[in-house]
Image (cartoon, rainbow, N blue to C red):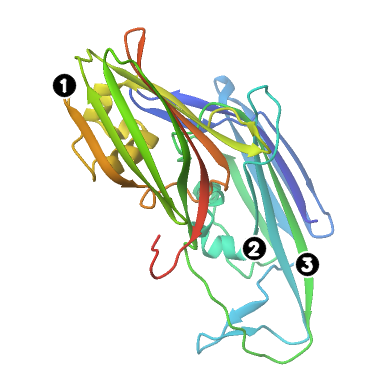
Amino acid sequence: IWAVIVLFTPFLIHHASAAIAKLIPVIDRIDATFNEKYSNSSVTLVTEGPQGRRRFPDFTVSIQTFRPITDVVVRNGTNTPVFTTPNANIFLVKINTKITISTLNGRFSQPFLDTTVSLCDLMKNPQKYHVLALFLFEIRRYGPLPTCPVSANLYVFSNVSLKRMALPTFLSESNFFSEILAKIWTVIVLFTPCTIHTVSCLLSHKVIPILTRVDLQDNLKYLNSSVVVHNTPTETKVDLAITVKRPLPDPWINVIVWIDIASGTLQAPLHNQTFRFCDFLRNPGMSRIGQILHREVKRYGKIPTCPIALELYQYCGISTGAIRLPTFLPEANYIMHVFLGVGKEIVYDSRWHGTLKHLRCTGSMRC
């Protein structure tokens, strides 16, 4: 083991305006240990500033490596992967990252993200690793990142701030901790160069929601609705009909999304947002999840405008296969709860049960 870094962090929403919120990770504590055989390094939390204690602490990373790090294979002049220098020691580093979010009762359960990647591949192709790329892009603002092979040297990144990190805005405020474990292997190459066949792609899979059940409860004074679900192995198609029977003055909407990772135990909501429905129809970008759904629904029928007309709104064959969700989301069950209300009255109450499914990108199924 080369290094272990644990970040104890709550999510904090910083409101830039009434309609737009920015999600910022705020670090409370960092525990870091390093193997002195390979590195003399430190990670320090910077909590004090010129104006006193900082609301958003920074941190400083100092890494002194004693041995070079590289990949097992490199490419020769003909762009063919071959082993590097024969009879040489090759030092490989793989990084395991776990991110765990607290549950409704405040306890931590199974990791929301658990992935192991090659350090060199991460630095060469960060776009393949969405969550790790967000962190890497912030680190490089504060100093030059090494390239592979990584030479034995001192690398310092001072007063790193995560305030500009572009986290998905559909995430809810929640406590979490991140554990980063780096392991190093020594590979001894004992033979002459030989060809290695490799396949690479920048995006190998996509994440789509598959519906299993929809529960509806309408306030028949205002509207009535129906949903029919048609499933295939690669997508869900939904027929949705809503008949508005009387005016909806200044309606509001609440969207809550839970993901079930820990063997049947729902986490704290991944997303929980309430906003004025008419504001959303004028500006769908105010809600990231709402925007994703709005974009797909409008392909299949007329989207209402305010004031909402008394008529039938019908959408046939809405496909979940075209929905673009972040690829770091795990395969898991989910529930999306959508309320539509007028004043203190609930007009429309729906619960959409399903599972997130990873599908491999192919020539016929593009990502």
- State the residue in front, 131 or 206: 206
Where is the C terminus found, in terms of image quarters?
A: bottom left
Q: What is the x, y in percent for residue 291?
A: 32, 37
Q: Amino acid at mark 2?
A: Ser
Which residue shows up at 27% across the image and 33% down it?
241
Cα distance between the residues tagged 3 and 1: 67 Å
Is 298 situated above or below 305? below
Mark 1 vs 2: CB contact within 8 A: no
Query: Type of residue at label 3?
Result: Trp
- The picture places residue 297, in percent across and down from the top left corner, at 28, 40
- State the SS at label 2: strand
Determine which residue is flagged by label 2.
118
Q: Residue furthest bottom?
A: 192
Within-10-Å neighbours for mark 1: few <14, some 14–19, many 20+: some
Q: Is residue 258 above or below residue 180?
A: above
**Mark number for residue 310?**
1
Apparent side of residue 291 relative to residue 255 in the rendered image (left or right): left
**In the current view of this chain or complex, which residue is farthest to the top?**
344
Lower position in the chain sequence, tag 1 or tag 2: 2
Question: Residue 68 at what x, y percent from top left?
Answer: 71, 68
**Disc number for residue 185:** 3
